[in-house]
Amino acid sequence: MSVNQGTRAYDAVIVGAGHNGLVAAAYLARAGRSVLVLERLGHTGGAAVSSTPFAGVEARLSRYSYLVSLLPQKIVADLGLDFRLRSRTISSYTPVERAGRPTGLLVGGGEARTRDAFARLTGGAREYAAWQRFYGMTGRVAERVFPTLTEPLPTRDELRRRIDDEGAWRTLFEEPIGAAVEEYFEDDLVRGVVLTDALIGTFADAHDPSLTQNRCFLYHVIGGGTGAWDVPVGGMGALTDALAAAARAAGAEIVTGHEAIRITGDEHGAEVTYSTADGEGVAAARHVLVNAAPQELAALTGDTPPEPAEGAQLKVNMLLTRLPKLRDPDVDPREAFAGTFHIAEGYGQLATAHAEAAAGRLPAAPPSEIYCHSLTDPTILGPELAGRGYQTLTLFGLHTPARLFDGDNDGVREELLDATLAELDAHLAEPLADCLATDADGRPCIEAKTPLDLERDLRLPGGNIFHRALSWPYSEADTGRWGVETPHPRVLLCGAGAVRGGGVSGVPGHNAAMAVLEQGA
């Protein structure tokens, strides 16, 4: 679809049809504003899409983003979205070998069962009691912080008063999270399971003085006011399809194959120059909302770009003919893979992997975590595959910064994938390779994406899934009222790089729309 070449005027032009841009478009169109959304790719959704990556195989995978926690129900309700989430029955399973035998920690399935699992692993009640205290504390913080994400930014002092727990404030906002992990827990495996939420897509040590790991941890435990991570029914593309439908139904115009190449403006309005297969055009607007990384925004406006971002993850999608058997005889694979299956994520292992990567080497035992979408939501599989017992696996690897792939992305990707799957195989009673399905061409159904692949495919700077380091959810000197403001009065940032951005949340899109509506004309 194409807009007419030449200049057309709108109340708002939105650059990028990822989920945040679509949220903003739907809110503004429902408020009666004329809205144009320009999308570079041939489809909407950005990183929140469902696709069929394996030739001739009817499995629609959440190819990039894959779980939902930070999306406020308020946005779903406000926009009338036909979108559902399902809870996972198991939170996590972490295999380990102790005293020469395979065992592990299964979290979920009820309080009594989880308590017993801790006792089997650690030999007593202490660690489970600490677990309850620690996550009781984070749960109270989540209840207080999460509702603020769709409000004007509180000050630091306002948020501190709202939390009303000095111990929690110190633990999450002032001291490296590693200090609390070590204070609360003694078992290395339990410590590692807790720490992983501070390291998703974030290359940091538990004691990093910058507290970038604390900010990552905070966003991973506040979602929905509970910290639960849920499965999108129909895959992640179901959300962005619903958002695009809501925006169009409200009157927004969404065009694909339109790449923004320049933004100019003043205090009265702005113009976006875009290119298509047919040439260039210009769209004028009272406001321009940019659903792209801060680096892309700077390139469009001609400003000095921020410090380079760097991603630090490996994303792997797989389709299996069956779930593999586990070495741990006490756990059913259908439960182990239903939640987050932690691999090589003991506390000491995470520290070693970080040190190795910081020294410029791939971790010898790459940490990663897996879950099986199709156990919770079999609708992503075609009827024939579901009937034959096929399952998906999504793997997310940690501590693999983009710098490790410079010079030989393909070769390092293959080496890292082999090492990562070897760590998984160490806990399986059969090789994962024996369970992989094959596509129509006879190739194994597995694909891996490095940070450099994500930078190429999605223009994520350095492959950083958050666009840049996550921010604290309070105002600072240059954040503005909603955390979406830029030096240009009629240009707003509505992507993951906004304050309180990151993850599949729609929060920056909502907040940018609120900022526009507050300004009136």
Image (cartoon, rainbow, N blue to C red):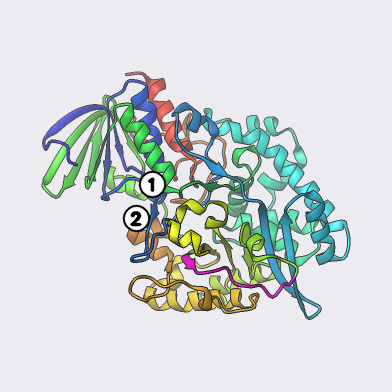
User: How far apart are labels 1 and 2 at the CA level?
Assistant: 11 Å
In-front residue for pair 68/177: 68
Indicate the position of residue 177 as horizontal and vertical percent values: 68, 54
* Secondary structure state at the residue bearing disc 1: helix
Residue furthest to the right:
124
In-front residue for pair 207/11: 11
Q: Give the main secondary structure, helix, strand or loop, of the magenta stretch.
A: loop
> Which quadrant would the C terminus be assigned to in this image?
top left
Indicate the position of residue 505 as horizontal and vertical percent values: 49, 41
In the rendered structure, which segment of residues is drawn in magenta?
A: 316-329
Asked where in the image residue 290 lies, by quadrant, the reply is top left
Indicate the position of residue 183 as horizontal and vertical percent values: 80, 56
Does residue 217 lie above or below 120 as drawn?
A: above
Residue at the spot 62% in from the left edge and 59% down from the top edge: 340
Q: How many marks?
A: 2
Residue 323 highlighted magenta (yes or no): yes
Residue furthest to the bottom:
100
Which residue is tagged 1? 294
Visible residue check, residue 32: yes
In the image: residue 103, left or right of residue 62 = right
Residue at the spot 58% in from the left edge and 31% down from the top edge: 148
Asked where in the image residue 487 lies, by quadrant, the reply is top left
Task: Kindly identify the amino acid type of the residue bearing the numbered disc 2.
Answer: Arg
Residue at the spot 48% in from the left edge and 45% down from the top edge: 504
Task: Kindly identify the amino acid type of the residue bearing the numbered disc 1.
Answer: Pro
> Which quadrant would the N terminus be assigned to in this image?
top left
In-front residue for pair 12/50: 50
Visible residue check, residue 365: no
Residue furthest to the top:
520
Which residue is tagged 2? 459
Indicate the position of residue 475 as horizontal and vertical percent values: 54, 34
In the image: residue 430, left or right of residue 288 = right
